[in-house]
Amino acid sequence: MDQTVKNQNIEIDLLLEAIYLKYGYDFRGYARASVRRRVLQQLSKSQLGTVSEMIHQLLYDQQYFETLLVDLTVNVTEMFRDPAFFKAQREAVIPRLRKRPSLKIWHAGCSSGEEVYSMAILLQEEGLYKNARIFATDANEAVLKKAQKGVFDANRMKTYTRNYMKAGGLEAFSDYYTSRYGLAMMKNVLKENIVFSHHNLVTDGVFGEMDMILCRNVLIYFNRELQERVFNLFWESLGPGGFLCLGTAETIRFSKHSDDFENMVENEKIFRKKGVMIPEDRDYASNR
């Protein structure tokens, strides 16, 4: 490793420490290669010459920090992303949830909200949305505001429609949004039972007793220690028999909580928290 790279790594450590001390966002446990790449990308776009100059800028210019925050937080998503996952939800998870009098679902790291609205649509079609409450959280206030508006690029609707159909959609996808001026606006009925709020997986605590937690393609950016912290947070936040849904490249199998979960749909990374059997679990066990 040459001296320039060593110096940059030291500067990046100081940058992450400055962000934490000044603004409370903790990226120190994020995978270093990913953080380094994103910091240097922002540096190349700015008029600044070094990471040290970035530190000075973000300490005295909150708007600059908010620009950097967008680069540091990963916001890659789409409606019905990985259609097989949503099809598995419809076929394997929804029948287990149907007998519960009410549902609490936490979508952690919801980004700009496309997958949150996808879940709302699925629950609507399965007759469960009326008694459900979806808590959609993210550490990035900017993308959270976008998610709350539910307004997306209309050019993406063709892709989203294909995903929806592959996921086993039951209606015309166009019924769920209205188009105007190149924008697609999700209908208000889908927003009624969604609560958007700020929550940082790195620093914040337990989030109620959930029936299901979705956190897909977020943990791949965390180091092992931070992943363990988040898995413990999810374990504490789930009720017995609750479901944990991860991204395609993520698993709980090598964590300290591995034995606390069982595979529900292994290929789609859907796990179920072990605990006292509830009625739908007894039905499921007897039919296996």
Image (cartoon, rainbow, N blue to C red):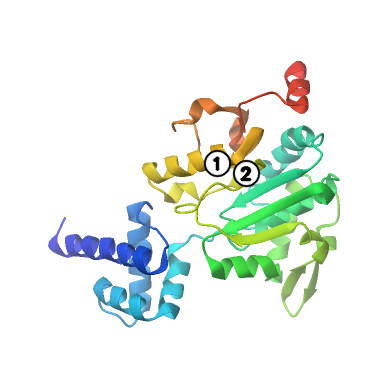
- Residue at disc 2, secondary structure: strand
Q: Earlier in the sequence, mark 2 or mark 1?
A: 2
Q: Which x, y percent locates residue 2?
A: 14, 59
Q: Residue at x 53, y 49 (%)?
A: 217
Q: Which x, y percent locates residue 224?
A: 38, 41
Where the N terminus falls, by quadrant? bottom left
Label 2 and label 1: CA atoms lie apart by 7 Å
Are the two marked residues, 2 and 1, in contact with CB atoms closer than 8 angstroms?
yes
- Residue at disc 1, secondary structure: helix
Amino acid at circle 1: Phe
Q: Residue at x 75, y 23 (%)?
A: 284
Quadrant of res 176: bottom right
Q: Which x, y percent locates residue 250?
A: 50, 40
- Mark yes or no: residue 250 visible: no
Question: In the rendered image of this protein, does residue 261 appear above or below residue 196?
Answer: above
6 relative to 140 in the view: left or right: left
Q: Residue at x 43, y 51 (%)?
A: 221
Q: Which residue does the numbered mark 2 point to in the structure image?
A: 213
Judging depth in this view, the residue of 17 and 110 nearest the camera is 17
Label total for image: 2
Question: In the rendered image of this protein, does residue 209 appear above or below residue 259?
Answer: below
Q: Residues within 10 Å of mark 2 (few under 14, many from 20)?
A: many
Q: Residue at x 72, y 58 (%)?
A: 194
Amino acid at circle 2: Ile
Image disc number at residue 118: none
- Mark yes or no: residue 271 visible: yes
Judging depth in this view, the residue of 192 and 286 nearest the camera is 192
Q: Which x, y percent locates residue 135?
A: 66, 54
Question: In the rendered image of this protein, does residue 3 appear above or below residue 208?
Answer: below
Image disc number at residue 234: 1
